[in-house]
Image (cartoon, grey):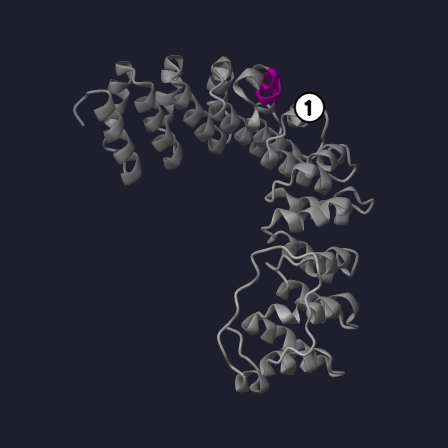
Amino acid sequence: MRRRSSASRRWARPRRRRSGAFRSEPTTSLNSQDPAVDDLLQRLQSPDAGVRRVAVLDFADLEDEALLPALAGLLRSDPEPALRAEAARALAGWHDAEVVDALAAALRDLPEVRAAAAQSLTELKDPQAGARLLPHAADADAFVCAAALRGLKELRVPGAAGPAMAALRHPEAAVRREAVGVLGWLKHAPALPLLAAAAAAADDVDAEVRRAAAGALGLASADAVQGVLPALCAALRDSAWPVREEAATTLGKLHAEAAAPALRAAMDDGYWQVRLRAARSLGRLRDAQALPVLTEALVHPAGNLRKEAAIALGEIGDARAVPALGPAAGDPDPEVRKAVRLALQRLGAPS
């Protein structure tokens, strides 16, 4: 826990909770009639950078909204970059307009400051506050654009769909990654064709963008699944294994039975992580034709894969798996043994 300065300790009293409601009007910090707040305000304006730094740290203990204008002002204009970065971190979680605007402005600051501001913007919880970020989501500066999209992602601001779709064509991969995240959280169906193109590597050279796009395709509704299957099956053959892993996961979430052959082929992937997700999806699909590849996985060196194969065999519910599950009941991994036991019980066989 951070220590308060001696002056702050003189006025020690309970913390105030952060504001849960967005305010578009500035918070007044003058004449607070609170000795602790007045003391901290004076120290935030001290000519001594060390005093100002301690005051910023003490704000984390006091957490009084009356201090927000002063702290936002310090973020905008303090001559010390390290102090501006500390102020950006201290403002995380506050939703007031002046705070959001100051953090957004700091996205154009020096790298240390803008990184702290970008991180603090991800902690916004009020969609009304997030709406103030919308203009920055179309900014010409790639860092500003990516940070704004990242801050908007979990807020599900409907107006972010347009800038995010436009950002899918941005030359910077970092911007495209954040755009995919926004569209995924919004479950924005009109973006499916663009996401499918990115996932299939037809439209993006960045593996992380392809991986994120493959995951975002999980937003497809039942009647749209057929339209994204080609892209996901192509992603199962991607050169980057995390993309293949994500595609295998998404196909299971979509209950895409037509993808069963591609998932069975993925059980021969060189990365066990991909095989694990393929096994999980085959279990969800209850694909009886997957028994040979799943029983083979029961003896794979990776315990996690053996466990997932046993679970999938139980979900499929085909008694032909019993002869292979029997020996696996003696697996050296207790988690695998438990999964095998449960699978045998589901199949009505002695465990």
The residue closer to the viewer here, 122 or 35, is 35
Q: Quadrant of residue 217?
A: top right
Q: Quadrant of residue 112?
A: bottom right
The residue closer to the viewer here, 269 or 107, is 107
Q: Amino acid at mark 1?
A: Ala
Q: Secondary structure at mark 1?
A: helix
Furthest-left residue in this view: 350
The residue that mark 1 highlights is 197
- The residue sitting at 26% across, 15% down in the picture is 319
Against 42, residue 292 (above or below) is above
- The residue sitting at 68% across, 27% down in the picture is 198
Against 232, residue 32 (above or below) is below
- Stretch of the chain drawn in magenta: 227-234
Q: Give percent across and percent down for residue 152.
A: 65, 45
Q: Is residue 22 magenta?
A: no
Q: Is residue 266 visible?
A: yes
The residue closer to the viewer here, 89 or 290, is 89
Q: Give percent across and percent down for residue 336.
A: 30, 35
Q: Quadrant of residue 86?
A: bottom right
Q: Is residue 333 visible?
A: no
